[in-house]
Image (tube, grey):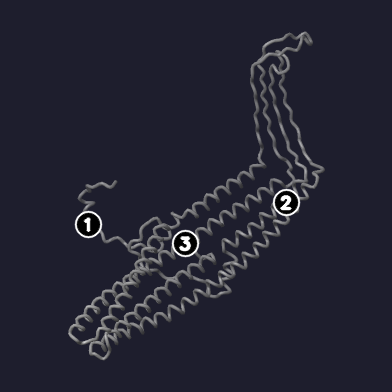
Amino acid sequence: MRRLILPLTALACCLSAPAARAQDLAAAIADALANAPALAEAKAGEAAARARLDQARAEGNPLLRVEGSYGAGRIDNGGFFGITADNVSPLAVQATAEMPLYAGGRIAAATAQARGGTDIARLGAEQARLQTIVRAVAAYSDVLTTRKLEARFAQLVTALTEMERQAGLRFKAGEIASSDVAQARARKAEADAGFAQAAGRRIAAEAAYERLTAKQPGDLAPLADLPPVPPSLGEALEQARAANPARQQAEAAVAVARAGVRAAQAEGLPTVGAFAEAAHVRDQFFPGYKADSVSVGVRGRWTLFAGGRVAAKIRAADAEVDASAARLRQADQALDGMVIDAWQGLATARQMVAASRLRRDAAAEALRGTRLEAQVGAKPTLAVLDAERENIEAEAALLQAEAMQTLSAWQLGALTGQLGR
Protein backbone atom coordinates (compact mmCIF):
# COMPACT_ATOMS: atom_id res chain seq x y z
CA MET A 1 0.00 0.00 0.00
CA ARG A 2 1.37 3.40 -0.90
CA ARG A 3 2.19 5.86 1.83
CA LEU A 4 -0.24 8.75 2.05
CA ILE A 5 2.21 11.19 3.65
CA LEU A 6 5.23 12.30 1.64
CA PRO A 7 8.19 14.45 2.66
CA LEU A 8 7.98 18.01 1.43
CA THR A 9 10.87 17.53 -0.98
CA ALA A 10 9.28 14.47 -2.53
CA LEU A 11 5.94 16.25 -2.79
CA ALA A 12 7.61 19.18 -4.53
CA CYS A 13 9.26 16.81 -7.00
CA CYS A 14 5.93 15.17 -7.73
CA LEU A 15 4.24 18.53 -8.34
CA SER A 16 7.02 19.74 -10.61
CA ALA A 17 7.43 16.46 -12.52
CA PRO A 18 6.28 16.44 -16.12
CA ALA A 19 3.26 14.43 -17.22
CA ALA A 20 3.72 10.69 -17.57
CA ARG A 21 5.20 9.64 -20.86
CA ALA A 22 3.04 7.75 -23.27
CA GLN A 23 3.55 4.03 -23.62
CA ASP A 24 5.54 3.07 -26.67
CA LEU A 25 5.72 -0.07 -28.77
CA ALA A 26 8.94 -1.30 -27.15
CA ALA A 27 7.32 -1.22 -23.70
CA ALA A 28 4.26 -3.03 -25.02
CA ILE A 29 6.45 -5.76 -26.52
CA ALA A 30 8.38 -6.13 -23.26
CA ASP A 31 5.14 -6.41 -21.29
CA ALA A 32 3.78 -9.00 -23.73
CA LEU A 33 6.95 -11.08 -23.50
CA ALA A 34 6.84 -10.97 -19.71
CA ASN A 35 3.18 -12.03 -19.66
CA ALA A 36 3.06 -14.66 -22.43
CA PRO A 37 2.14 -18.13 -21.10
CA ALA A 38 3.28 -19.77 -24.33
CA LEU A 39 6.72 -18.23 -23.96
CA ALA A 40 6.95 -19.26 -20.31
CA GLU A 41 6.00 -22.81 -21.29
CA ALA A 42 8.61 -22.83 -24.05
CA LYS A 43 11.31 -21.62 -21.67
CA ALA A 44 10.36 -24.30 -19.14
CA GLY A 45 10.60 -26.87 -21.92
CA GLU A 46 14.04 -25.53 -22.80
CA ALA A 47 15.18 -25.90 -19.19
CA ALA A 48 13.88 -29.48 -19.13
CA ALA A 49 15.71 -30.26 -22.37
CA ARG A 50 18.99 -28.94 -20.94
CA ALA A 51 18.48 -31.16 -17.90
CA ARG A 52 17.96 -34.19 -20.17
CA LEU A 53 21.19 -33.32 -21.97
CA ASP A 54 23.06 -33.24 -18.65
CA GLN A 55 21.49 -36.59 -17.79
CA ALA A 56 22.63 -38.13 -21.08
CA ARG A 57 26.17 -36.85 -20.58
CA ALA A 58 26.21 -38.20 -17.05
CA GLU A 59 25.78 -41.75 -18.35
CA GLY A 60 29.48 -41.74 -19.23
CA ASN A 61 30.56 -40.79 -15.71
CA PRO A 62 31.58 -43.23 -12.92
CA LEU A 63 28.83 -44.66 -10.74
CA LEU A 64 29.24 -45.39 -7.03
CA ARG A 65 26.53 -47.43 -5.39
CA VAL A 66 26.20 -48.59 -1.76
CA GLU A 67 23.74 -51.26 -0.63
CA GLY A 68 23.15 -52.55 2.86
CA SER A 69 20.80 -54.49 5.09
CA TYR A 70 20.48 -55.19 8.79
CA GLY A 71 18.03 -57.44 10.58
CA ALA A 72 17.38 -59.64 13.59
CA GLY A 73 16.51 -63.36 13.53
CA ARG A 74 17.49 -66.88 14.48
CA ILE A 75 19.51 -69.53 12.62
CA ASP A 76 19.12 -73.24 13.31
CA ASN A 77 21.38 -75.47 11.16
CA GLY A 78 20.12 -78.64 12.82
CA GLY A 79 23.44 -79.19 14.54
CA PHE A 80 25.30 -79.36 11.23
CA PHE A 81 29.04 -79.00 11.84
CA GLY A 82 28.17 -78.90 15.51
CA ILE A 83 26.66 -75.44 15.23
CA THR A 84 23.81 -74.91 17.61
CA ALA A 85 20.83 -72.68 17.02
CA ASP A 86 21.32 -69.10 18.06
CA ASN A 87 19.89 -65.61 17.66
CA VAL A 88 21.67 -63.51 15.03
CA SER A 89 21.75 -59.95 13.68
CA PRO A 90 22.58 -60.37 9.99
CA LEU A 91 24.45 -57.43 8.50
CA ALA A 92 25.52 -56.91 4.88
CA VAL A 93 27.09 -53.85 3.29
CA GLN A 94 28.37 -53.69 -0.29
CA ALA A 95 29.92 -50.76 -2.18
CA THR A 96 30.27 -50.92 -5.95
CA ALA A 97 32.05 -48.50 -8.29
CA GLU A 98 31.50 -48.82 -12.04
CA MET A 99 32.99 -46.98 -14.98
CA PRO A 100 31.77 -47.54 -18.54
CA LEU A 101 34.70 -48.19 -20.88
CA TYR A 102 32.87 -48.99 -24.10
CA ALA A 103 29.13 -48.70 -24.74
CA GLY A 104 28.98 -49.35 -28.46
CA GLY A 105 28.04 -45.73 -29.14
CA ARG A 106 24.97 -45.76 -26.90
CA ILE A 107 26.08 -42.85 -24.71
CA ALA A 108 27.25 -40.74 -27.65
CA ALA A 109 23.99 -41.36 -29.51
CA ALA A 110 21.86 -40.55 -26.47
CA THR A 111 23.86 -37.37 -25.92
CA ALA A 112 23.37 -36.35 -29.55
CA GLN A 113 19.64 -36.96 -29.26
CA ALA A 114 19.43 -34.91 -26.08
CA ARG A 115 21.51 -32.13 -27.63
CA GLY A 116 19.17 -32.04 -30.60
CA GLY A 117 16.20 -31.92 -28.22
CA THR A 118 17.80 -28.95 -26.50
CA ASP A 119 18.20 -27.18 -29.83
CA ILE A 120 14.57 -27.88 -30.72
CA ALA A 121 13.38 -26.53 -27.36
CA ARG A 122 15.57 -23.43 -27.64
CA LEU A 123 14.31 -22.73 -31.14
CA GLY A 124 10.75 -23.30 -29.97
CA ALA A 125 11.23 -20.65 -27.31
CA GLU A 126 12.60 -18.27 -29.96
CA GLN A 127 9.63 -18.99 -32.21
CA ALA A 128 7.25 -18.28 -29.34
CA ARG A 129 9.10 -15.02 -28.67
CA LEU A 130 8.76 -13.88 -32.27
CA GLN A 131 5.09 -14.78 -32.40
CA THR A 132 4.48 -12.86 -29.19
CA ILE A 133 6.23 -9.81 -30.62
CA VAL A 134 4.08 -9.87 -33.76
CA ARG A 135 0.94 -10.25 -31.63
CA ALA A 136 2.02 -7.28 -29.51
CA VAL A 137 2.58 -5.15 -32.59
CA ALA A 138 -0.83 -6.13 -33.94
CA ALA A 139 -2.55 -5.34 -30.64
CA TYR A 140 -0.73 -2.01 -30.26
CA SER A 141 -1.50 -0.98 -33.83
CA ASP A 142 -5.13 -2.06 -33.47
CA VAL A 143 -5.62 0.09 -30.37
CA LEU A 144 -4.15 3.14 -32.11
CA THR A 145 -6.25 2.59 -35.24
CA THR A 146 -9.54 2.01 -33.45
CA ARG A 147 -9.03 5.00 -31.19
CA LYS A 148 -8.45 7.27 -34.17
CA LEU A 149 -11.50 5.86 -35.93
CA GLU A 150 -13.67 6.34 -32.86
CA ALA A 151 -12.48 9.93 -32.44
CA ARG A 152 -13.18 10.67 -36.11
CA PHE A 153 -16.67 9.19 -35.95
CA ALA A 154 -17.32 11.17 -32.76
CA GLN A 155 -16.46 14.36 -34.68
CA LEU A 156 -18.73 13.29 -37.51
CA VAL A 157 -21.61 12.59 -35.11
CA THR A 158 -21.17 16.03 -33.55
CA ALA A 159 -21.16 17.70 -36.96
CA LEU A 160 -24.19 15.77 -38.21
CA THR A 161 -26.08 16.46 -35.00
CA GLU A 162 -25.69 20.17 -35.64
CA MET A 163 -26.63 19.76 -39.30
CA GLU A 164 -29.73 17.81 -38.32
CA ARG A 165 -30.71 20.58 -35.92
CA GLN A 166 -30.16 23.24 -38.58
CA ALA A 167 -32.14 21.22 -41.08
CA GLY A 168 -35.05 21.12 -38.65
CA LEU A 169 -34.90 24.89 -38.19
CA ARG A 170 -34.77 25.50 -41.92
CA PHE A 171 -37.73 23.19 -42.44
CA LYS A 172 -39.74 25.11 -39.88
CA ALA A 173 -38.79 28.31 -41.67
CA GLY A 174 -40.00 26.82 -44.96
CA GLU A 175 -36.57 26.87 -46.62
CA ILE A 176 -36.26 23.12 -47.27
CA ALA A 177 -38.59 20.18 -47.72
CA SER A 178 -39.31 17.48 -45.15
CA SER A 179 -37.38 14.98 -47.28
CA ASP A 180 -34.21 16.96 -46.70
CA VAL A 181 -34.78 16.72 -42.94
CA ALA A 182 -35.36 12.98 -43.22
CA GLN A 183 -32.17 12.52 -45.22
CA ALA A 184 -30.22 14.54 -42.66
CA ARG A 185 -31.67 12.37 -39.92
CA ALA A 186 -30.70 9.24 -41.88
CA ARG A 187 -27.13 10.49 -42.28
CA LYS A 188 -27.01 11.19 -38.54
CA ALA A 189 -28.26 7.67 -37.76
CA GLU A 190 -25.64 6.23 -40.10
CA ALA A 191 -22.95 8.17 -38.26
CA ASP A 192 -24.29 6.94 -34.91
CA ALA A 193 -24.03 3.36 -36.15
CA GLY A 194 -20.50 3.96 -37.38
CA PHE A 195 -19.54 5.47 -34.05
CA ALA A 196 -21.01 2.51 -32.15
CA GLN A 197 -19.09 0.08 -34.34
CA ALA A 198 -15.86 2.05 -33.90
CA ALA A 199 -16.36 2.19 -30.12
CA GLY A 200 -16.96 -1.56 -30.01
CA ARG A 201 -13.80 -2.24 -32.02
CA ARG A 202 -11.83 0.06 -29.72
CA ILE A 203 -13.10 -1.70 -26.59
CA ALA A 204 -12.28 -5.11 -28.07
CA ALA A 205 -8.81 -3.93 -29.16
CA GLU A 206 -8.04 -2.53 -25.70
CA ALA A 207 -9.24 -5.75 -24.07
CA ALA A 208 -6.99 -7.80 -26.36
CA TYR A 209 -4.06 -5.50 -25.54
CA GLU A 210 -4.69 -5.93 -21.80
CA ARG A 211 -4.91 -9.72 -22.11
CA LEU A 212 -1.63 -9.78 -23.98
CA THR A 213 0.36 -7.35 -21.81
CA ALA A 214 -1.48 -7.62 -18.46
CA LYS A 215 -1.64 -3.81 -18.50
CA GLN A 216 -4.32 -1.37 -19.54
CA PRO A 217 -3.44 0.67 -22.61
CA GLY A 218 -2.92 4.26 -21.55
CA ASP A 219 -1.75 6.98 -23.88
CA LEU A 220 0.04 5.17 -26.68
CA ALA A 221 2.82 6.84 -28.60
CA PRO A 222 2.59 6.79 -32.41
CA LEU A 223 4.24 3.89 -34.14
CA ALA A 224 7.91 4.37 -34.93
CA ASP A 225 9.52 3.59 -38.25
CA LEU A 226 9.01 0.15 -39.70
CA PRO A 227 11.59 -2.52 -38.83
CA PRO A 228 14.26 -3.16 -41.48
CA VAL A 229 13.27 -5.67 -44.12
CA PRO A 230 15.35 -7.41 -46.82
CA PRO A 231 15.74 -5.35 -49.99
CA SER A 232 14.45 -8.11 -52.27
CA LEU A 233 12.27 -11.18 -52.14
CA GLY A 234 15.22 -13.42 -52.99
CA GLU A 235 17.23 -12.14 -50.05
CA ALA A 236 14.17 -12.48 -47.80
CA LEU A 237 13.86 -16.16 -48.75
CA GLU A 238 17.58 -16.75 -48.14
CA GLN A 239 17.50 -15.06 -44.74
CA ALA A 240 14.41 -17.01 -43.73
CA ARG A 241 15.98 -20.36 -44.67
CA ALA A 242 19.09 -19.44 -42.66
CA ALA A 243 17.52 -17.89 -39.57
CA ASN A 244 13.86 -18.91 -39.21
CA PRO A 245 13.45 -20.81 -35.90
CA ALA A 246 10.63 -23.05 -37.17
CA ARG A 247 12.75 -24.26 -40.08
CA GLN A 248 15.76 -24.74 -37.82
CA GLN A 249 13.57 -26.85 -35.53
CA ALA A 250 12.74 -29.15 -38.44
CA GLU A 251 16.44 -29.33 -39.32
CA ALA A 252 17.35 -30.21 -35.72
CA ALA A 253 14.69 -32.93 -35.75
CA VAL A 254 16.51 -34.58 -38.67
CA ALA A 255 19.73 -34.61 -36.63
CA VAL A 256 17.87 -36.17 -33.69
CA ALA A 257 16.43 -38.87 -35.94
CA ARG A 258 19.89 -39.70 -37.31
CA ALA A 259 21.20 -39.98 -33.76
CA GLY A 260 18.30 -42.36 -33.12
CA VAL A 261 19.60 -44.59 -35.91
CA ARG A 262 23.02 -44.70 -34.25
CA ALA A 263 21.38 -45.53 -30.93
CA ALA A 264 19.43 -48.39 -32.51
CA GLN A 265 22.57 -49.76 -34.16
CA ALA A 266 24.43 -49.62 -30.85
CA GLU A 267 21.90 -52.04 -29.32
CA GLY A 268 23.64 -54.87 -31.20
CA LEU A 269 27.12 -54.02 -29.89
CA PRO A 270 28.75 -55.11 -26.63
CA THR A 271 29.22 -53.01 -23.51
CA VAL A 272 32.33 -53.14 -21.33
CA GLY A 273 32.90 -51.50 -17.98
CA ALA A 274 35.38 -51.58 -15.13
CA PHE A 275 34.19 -52.23 -11.60
CA ALA A 276 35.41 -52.38 -8.02
CA GLU A 277 33.40 -53.96 -5.21
CA ALA A 278 33.87 -54.20 -1.46
CA ALA A 279 31.62 -56.20 0.89
CA HIS A 280 31.26 -56.57 4.67
CA VAL A 281 29.05 -59.45 5.89
CA ARG A 282 28.13 -60.63 9.43
CA ASP A 283 25.82 -63.42 10.73
CA GLN A 284 24.58 -64.34 7.27
CA PHE A 285 24.82 -68.16 7.12
CA PHE A 286 25.44 -69.25 10.72
CA PRO A 287 25.96 -67.47 14.00
CA GLY A 288 29.24 -65.60 14.13
CA TYR A 289 29.81 -65.76 10.37
CA LYS A 290 32.15 -63.02 9.11
CA ALA A 291 33.35 -62.19 5.63
CA ASP A 292 35.04 -59.14 4.08
CA SER A 293 35.85 -59.07 0.39
CA VAL A 294 37.30 -56.73 -2.25
CA SER A 295 37.29 -57.36 -5.99
CA VAL A 296 38.35 -55.37 -9.06
CA GLY A 297 37.70 -56.36 -12.63
CA VAL A 298 36.05 -55.83 -15.99
CA ARG A 299 32.47 -56.72 -16.77
CA GLY A 300 30.98 -57.01 -20.26
CA ARG A 301 27.71 -57.88 -21.92
CA TRP A 302 26.87 -58.73 -25.50
CA THR A 303 23.55 -59.99 -26.78
CA LEU A 304 24.45 -62.25 -29.69
CA PHE A 305 20.89 -63.01 -30.77
CA ALA A 306 17.93 -60.75 -30.06
CA GLY A 307 15.29 -62.39 -32.23
CA GLY A 308 15.16 -59.47 -34.70
CA ARG A 309 14.63 -56.81 -32.07
CA VAL A 310 17.69 -54.76 -33.01
CA ALA A 311 16.99 -54.96 -36.73
CA ALA A 312 13.41 -53.79 -36.15
CA LYS A 313 14.64 -50.83 -34.10
CA ILE A 314 17.05 -49.87 -36.87
CA ARG A 315 14.30 -50.01 -39.51
CA ALA A 316 12.02 -47.88 -37.36
CA ALA A 317 14.81 -45.34 -36.79
CA ASP A 318 15.58 -45.21 -40.54
CA ALA A 319 11.90 -44.55 -41.23
CA GLU A 320 11.91 -41.72 -38.69
CA VAL A 321 14.87 -40.15 -40.52
CA ASP A 322 12.89 -40.26 -43.77
CA ALA A 323 9.86 -38.74 -42.03
CA SER A 324 11.96 -35.98 -40.46
CA ALA A 325 13.55 -35.18 -43.82
CA ALA A 326 10.07 -34.96 -45.36
CA ARG A 327 8.94 -32.62 -42.58
CA LEU A 328 11.98 -30.46 -43.26
CA ARG A 329 11.03 -30.20 -46.93
CA GLN A 330 7.49 -29.38 -45.91
CA ALA A 331 8.78 -26.69 -43.54
CA ASP A 332 10.85 -25.22 -46.38
CA GLN A 333 7.81 -25.08 -48.63
CA ALA A 334 5.60 -23.58 -45.93
CA LEU A 335 8.25 -21.03 -45.01
CA ASP A 336 8.74 -19.96 -48.62
CA GLY A 337 4.99 -19.51 -48.94
CA MET A 338 4.73 -17.43 -45.77
CA VAL A 339 7.69 -15.25 -46.76
CA ILE A 340 6.23 -14.65 -50.23
CA ASP A 341 2.84 -13.82 -48.71
CA ALA A 342 4.39 -11.42 -46.20
CA TRP A 343 6.55 -9.80 -48.86
CA GLN A 344 3.64 -9.32 -51.24
CA GLY A 345 1.45 -8.20 -48.36
CA LEU A 346 3.97 -5.53 -47.45
CA ALA A 347 4.30 -4.40 -51.07
CA THR A 348 0.52 -4.26 -51.40
CA ALA A 349 0.17 -2.38 -48.12
CA ARG A 350 2.71 0.21 -49.24
CA GLN A 351 0.75 0.81 -52.43
CA MET A 352 -2.48 0.97 -50.45
CA VAL A 353 -0.97 3.52 -48.06
CA ALA A 354 0.17 5.72 -50.94
CA ALA A 355 -3.20 5.48 -52.70
CA SER A 356 -5.14 5.98 -49.45
CA ARG A 357 -3.18 9.14 -48.68
CA LEU A 358 -4.06 10.54 -52.09
CA ARG A 359 -7.69 9.55 -51.50
CA ARG A 360 -7.72 11.15 -48.05
CA ASP A 361 -6.19 14.39 -49.31
CA ALA A 362 -8.62 14.51 -52.23
CA ALA A 363 -11.59 13.77 -49.97
CA ALA A 364 -10.51 16.47 -47.51
CA GLU A 365 -10.16 18.98 -50.34
CA ALA A 366 -13.55 17.99 -51.72
CA LEU A 367 -15.10 18.43 -48.27
CA ARG A 368 -13.65 21.91 -47.90
CA GLY A 369 -14.91 22.89 -51.33
CA THR A 370 -18.37 21.45 -50.74
CA ARG A 371 -18.69 23.32 -47.44
CA LEU A 372 -17.81 26.61 -49.12
CA GLU A 373 -20.28 25.96 -51.94
CA ALA A 374 -22.98 25.02 -49.44
CA GLN A 375 -22.41 28.26 -47.51
CA VAL A 376 -23.20 30.30 -50.62
CA GLY A 377 -26.10 28.05 -51.56
CA ALA A 378 -24.45 26.46 -54.58
CA LYS A 379 -24.87 22.96 -53.08
CA PRO A 380 -27.39 21.48 -50.65
CA THR A 381 -26.60 20.47 -47.12
CA LEU A 382 -26.86 16.80 -48.06
CA ALA A 383 -23.87 17.24 -50.37
CA VAL A 384 -21.84 18.29 -47.33
CA LEU A 385 -23.02 15.20 -45.47
CA ASP A 386 -21.98 12.98 -48.36
CA ALA A 387 -18.59 14.69 -48.50
CA GLU A 388 -18.17 14.16 -44.74
CA ARG A 389 -18.92 10.46 -45.16
CA GLU A 390 -16.47 10.10 -48.04
CA ASN A 391 -13.80 11.91 -46.04
CA ILE A 392 -14.12 9.65 -43.01
CA GLU A 393 -14.17 6.56 -45.23
CA ALA A 394 -10.92 7.76 -46.81
CA GLU A 395 -9.34 8.35 -43.40
CA ALA A 396 -10.45 4.92 -42.20
CA ALA A 397 -8.98 3.28 -45.30
CA LEU A 398 -5.66 5.05 -44.70
CA LEU A 399 -5.54 3.97 -41.05
CA GLN A 400 -6.25 0.37 -41.98
CA ALA A 401 -3.66 0.41 -44.76
CA GLU A 402 -1.03 1.81 -42.38
CA ALA A 403 -1.88 -0.89 -39.82
CA MET A 404 -1.59 -3.56 -42.53
CA GLN A 405 1.78 -2.17 -43.60
CA THR A 406 3.10 -2.20 -40.03
CA LEU A 407 1.94 -5.73 -39.31
CA SER A 408 3.27 -7.07 -42.64
CA ALA A 409 6.70 -5.55 -42.00
CA TRP A 410 6.92 -7.09 -38.52
CA GLN A 411 5.68 -10.45 -39.80
CA LEU A 412 8.35 -10.43 -42.49
CA GLY A 413 10.97 -9.53 -39.90
CA ALA A 414 9.86 -12.43 -37.71
CA LEU A 415 9.94 -14.89 -40.60
CA THR A 416 13.42 -13.84 -41.67
CA GLY A 417 14.80 -13.81 -38.11
CA GLN A 418 15.52 -10.08 -38.21
CA LEU A 419 13.84 -9.19 -34.93
CA GLY A 420 16.77 -9.07 -32.55
CA ARG A 421 16.56 -9.72 -28.83
Residue furthest out toward the right: 305
Q: Nearer the viewer, residue 43 or 149?
A: 149
**Kind of residue indicated by mark 1:** Leu
Q: Secondary structure at mark 1?
A: helix
Residue 161: quarter of image:
bottom left
Q: Which residue is mark 2?
A: 262
Instruction: Give the CA distance from mark 1 to mark 3.
Output: 36 Å
Q: Residues within 10 Å of mark 1 (few under 14, many from 20)?
A: few
Residue 38 seen by the camera? yes
Residue 174, position as x, y percentages in the image: 19, 86
Residue 95, position as x, y percentages in the image: 67, 28
- In terms of sequence position, does the residue under pointer 3 or pointer 2 come before the other? 3
**Kind of residue indicated by mark 3:** Ile
- Residue found at x 27% / y 61%: 19
Q: Residues within 10 Å of mark 2 (few under 14, many from 20)?
A: many
Of badges 3 and 2, the one in the foreground is 3
Q: Which residue is mark 1?
A: 15
- For this view, does 65 lie left or right of residue 102? left
- In terms of sequence position, does the residue under pointer 1 or pointer 3 come before the other? 1
Residue 133, position as x, y percentages in the image: 47, 62
- For this view, does 213 lie left or right of residue 72? left
**Contact (CB < 8 A) between labels 2 and 1?**
no
Of badges 1 and 3, the one in the foreground is 3
Residue 372 tag number? none
Residue 133 tag number? 3
Where 376 falls versus 357 (above or below)? Answer: below
Q: Secondary structure at mark 2?
A: helix
Q: Nearer the viewer, residue 309 or 45?
A: 309
Instruction: Give the CA distance from mark 3 to mark 2.
Output: 39 Å
